Image (cartoon, coloured by chain):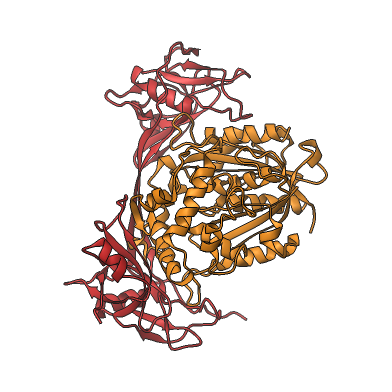
Amino acid sequence: MGHHVGIVGVGQTHHARRRTDVSQAGLVREAVDRALADANLTIEEIDSVVVATGPVLFAAVNHPELWVANAIGAQGKPVMRVTSGGGAGFAGALAGYYQVAGGYSQRTLVVAYDKLSEGPLQYSISTLYDPFWGREFAVGIMGFSAAYWRARMDVLGHTEEAAAMVAAKNRNNAINNPYAHQKKAVTVDDVINSRPLCWPIKLLDVPPISDGAAAIVLANEKVAAKSTTRPAWIRGMAYCCEADNAAERSMMLSEPLALASKQVYRAAGITNPRRQFDVVEVQEPYSCFELNYYESLGLCPPGGAAELVASGATQLDGDIPVNPSGGCMGANPIGAVGVIRLIEGATQVMGRNESNQIKDAKLALVQSGGGWANLRGCAVLSA
Amino acid sequence: MYSAPETMPIELPTFHADISLPYTLTPGRAAGTFLAEVKNKRIIGSRFASGMVVAPAEDFSSVDGEEPESFVEAPQTGVLTAFTRVDGEVIGFIKLDGCDNEFPHKILADLSDLAVGQRVEAEWQDGVEESITAIKGFRLAPDAPEGAVKPAGETEEPLGSIKYALSLPYEHAYGPYYGRMFDEIRENGRVMGVRCTNADVALLPPREIDDISHKKTGTWKTCADTGTIRGCSIINMEFVGQTREPPYVYAEIVLDGASTRLIHMIEIDDVEDAKKRIKPGTRVRAIWTEGERKGSMSDIERFEVIDE
């Protein structure tokens, strides 16, 4: 491996259901200004830029990186767009990580965003399905996700109540998140009694639809000190894929996430994730996903997720807090979420998280994913 | 040694698909102000600290990303810098007097009368608001005096969002495997897959290479109209692009004889009854449409629970 890579500056917008005061480019500019200021840098000191967004159909601008480059002063720099559905931000950060780790850049700016108020979300997402095979019956990923949650209820005991506990935990954690826009205290019963959208998925199991952007500056060990005395070092980072409609694909555990975590844990020296991590940030497009991640990330054995959430261990005061920021339940600008989760994990180990700082957090696990259900990754961040 | 390709391109029918999406786009402050002002027949531009003037207005300088100092009113006259003809319409780039950028618009003249450097003048179209097409185009104006950039003064509130729509027609090629499968669906009303390399079960949809063994798949196999639900959810919500009225069941079904799933629908009368009766493991049967089949998955109208 080449260089060590640290997150040395972070910035995100105050996410909202609809931002009519800024265009996509203006939204990106806000996050970039904040990340550069946080990193004590100007755009001139950035070697390369990665722009990450969800599908073009979300907001109807093709090659949005051209528009964005103007807005952030990236003219003349290497600019690359990365897209990977919900995992776009994380995949973009991984592309930036490769550039810095590989020695091709000393400092890389990664900015990720989506402006979901502009287009029809579920319909846009449905276009990821094979046009011959399933698209005409698709319900975004909501129909699909609900279907396999239903199957996991029978096999793994991922009950409606267990997922409601996740939703209530994250929604209540989001109240302290200054960047979240959905901040309302809810109880497990509120979630269970909320309106079904794709049963078993109900309204309060689903994050809001958001406009938002998030940016991080990645730097190698030689130049990190210019920005901060306490970077969040990336100890391992991976993003894996599985076959889409293969005969042996398990719908019970996320196999690509299990593969990615195995690689990352090996790189970072993690042998007992439940004990070693101080804090975890995951991307939960619906509450039921978080249960699934507990198992694929090895925080509990397969089938142990409902028990883990019920034990309170993943609450703020538990031994393995998950989503102290509120996760996607506070704000969900899809393409930006992978970077938002990295920011929340990084600021925890930097000791300056703005939502709910976990005391003395030194080691954070960050998960993100995209595509359908089959692109999943994670990263380990340390002080 | 040269060897001939196994396949040659041949013309075959395609699968037509339309993607039609409505949007509410956010122009931002500068473009939003420009669009709000066209009803006053004014062209609003941006002036940056460097002295650069850009019209129509932009939120960020294309030179260094800086935001404009102020909005200005650009003159309605300028110079033609490039032109072409597309679908019978003449499109040109125009550099307005006193401005530093060029932008594309319609040119209201014959191609044969045009030359780079000619003077042009905006012609407005009545009844159009909130769109750059409020300017009908630019006509030749050889004697138009040089205009000047003026302070914009009071400007309209920027537009927060603009209605927009995309309608994208596609013609997808089936390829040999999907081609055979949909032909069998249309002609014979049966679903066929190809055998995977290590068992007498069909991969659906059929494919050339087995995903797991990475070897060539085997011979064709007809799957039954019956199958088992692997995952299902009850769709209660309505959304853009929906093809059925909720509530109904979204189901991923493995047909008897197949090893992979297909996505389809089950109609329901009662939601609470469906939660109990329709679940992973439930047996179902395909109900084909009456009359002529089109050769698509919608030739199966729905699936029904088998009362066993």
Provide residue B126's location: percent of width, then percent of height.
28, 23
Q: Residue at horizontal 47%, vertical 67%? A: A157
Which one is nearer the viewer's eye here, A37 or B292? A37
**Can residue B241 be seen in this snapshot?**
yes
**In the displayed structure, does residue A161 sit left or right of residue B17?**
right
Residue A81 visible in the current orientation: no
Q: How many marks?
A: 0
Quarter assignment of residue A10: top right
Q: Which corner quadrant holds the N terminus of chain A?
A: bottom right
Query: In the depicted view, which residue is nearer to us: B68 or A291?
Result: A291
Above or below B190: residue B267: above
Image location (x, y in percent) of residue A214: 59, 41
Depth order, front residue of A130/B303: B303
Residue extending furthest toward the left? B291
- The answer to which image quadrant residue A132 occupies is bottom left
The answer to which of A214 and B156 lies nearer the viewer is A214
Name of the residue lying farthest toward the front: A311
Indicate the position of residue B188 as horizontal and vertical percent values. Answer: 25, 81
The residue depicted at 42 percent of the width and 87 percent of the height is: B219
Instruction: Provide the letter of the chain coloured red.
Output: B
The answer to whether residue B277 is left or right of residue B100 is left
Give the residue displayed 43% in from the left and 58% down from the top.
A161
Q: Is residue A331 above or below residue B216?
A: above
Q: Position of residue A260 (x, y in %)?
A: 63, 64
The residue sitting at 43% across, 12% down in the picture is B154
Query: In the figure, what tint was chain A given?
Result: orange
